[in-house]
Image (spheres, rainbow, N blue to C red):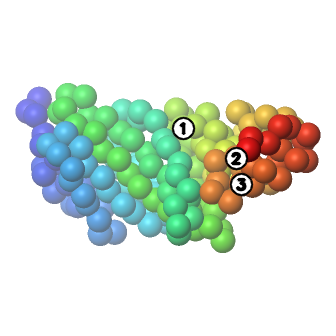
Amino acid sequence: MQRMSIADFIEKLNEKYRGGLEVQQRSEKRVYIRVPRENLKEIARIIFRDFGAKFSIATGIDVREGFEVLYHFTFDRHGFICTVKTLAPREDPKLESLVEIIPGTTWIEREIHDILGVKFEGHPNLKRLVKAEFLAEDEYPFRKDFDLKKFKERHNLPIAK
């Protein structure tokens, strides 16, 4: 199989996905694609199933607009990584789960839910995974608005000076 460049990949992806892509190429080995949350499942299906990329991991970040979730895919035979970024707005932190397309997202979606509070709709088992039992359901320790001082006071933990 001939090696596919990122430019080739983006061209072929644009043929399959008609939603319009916001593409940012950082190097010859790394490309970022931003899509609206409504199109996340479609783009993931194309990249994972049609192009045969491997799902590597997902990450979640608390940003000004809400919670950005990044799904990282590797194209080992072609020597590059594609990261799909989408935003779950702060006032409505929901995304469609990718578990039915990519079973390997099961645990990482649960983890992102635990620490940031992003609800992955359609996830078959969105129960607590990594968050400590003494944290309330609506306490998300990786959010910027998580008040560590109040948390420590509530649980009688020492507060650093």
The first of marks 3 and 1 along the sequence is: 1
Q: Are marks 3 and 2 in contact (CB under 8 Å)?
A: yes
On screen, residue 64 versus residue 19, left or right, reads right
Number of residues whose C-alpha sits closer than 10 Å to that of mark 3, classed few (under 14), some (14–19) or many (20 or more): few
Q: Amino acid at mark 3?
A: Phe
Compared across the picture, whether 33 is left or right of 150 comes to: left
- Across and down, in percent, residue 127 comes to 76, 40
Q: Earlier in the sequence, mark 3 or mark 2?
A: 2
Q: Quadrant of residue 145?
A: bottom right
- Crowding near pointer 2: few (<14 within 10 Å), some, many (20+)? some
Q: Which residue is mark 1?
A: 105
Which amino acid type is marked by label 2? Answer: Pro
Could you tell me the amino acid type at mark 1? Thr
Indicate whether 112 appears above or below 15: above
Q: Secondary structure at mark 3?
A: loop
Image height check: is 120 above or below 128?
below
The residue lying at 83 percent from left, 37 percent from top is 158
Name the image quarter holding the C terminus. Answer: top right
Label placed on residue 146: 3
The disc at residue 141 is: 2
**1 or 2: tag closer to the N-terminus:** 1
Q: Is residue 22 above or below residue 13?
A: below
Q: Which disc is residue 121 wearing?
A: none
Give coordinates of residue 3: x percent, y percent.
Answer: 10, 34
> Residue visible at 54% across and 37% down?
105
Closer-to-camera residue (98/85): 85
Residues at discs 3 and 1 in contact (Cβ within 8 Å): no
* Residue 47 horizontal/vertical position (percent): 33, 46
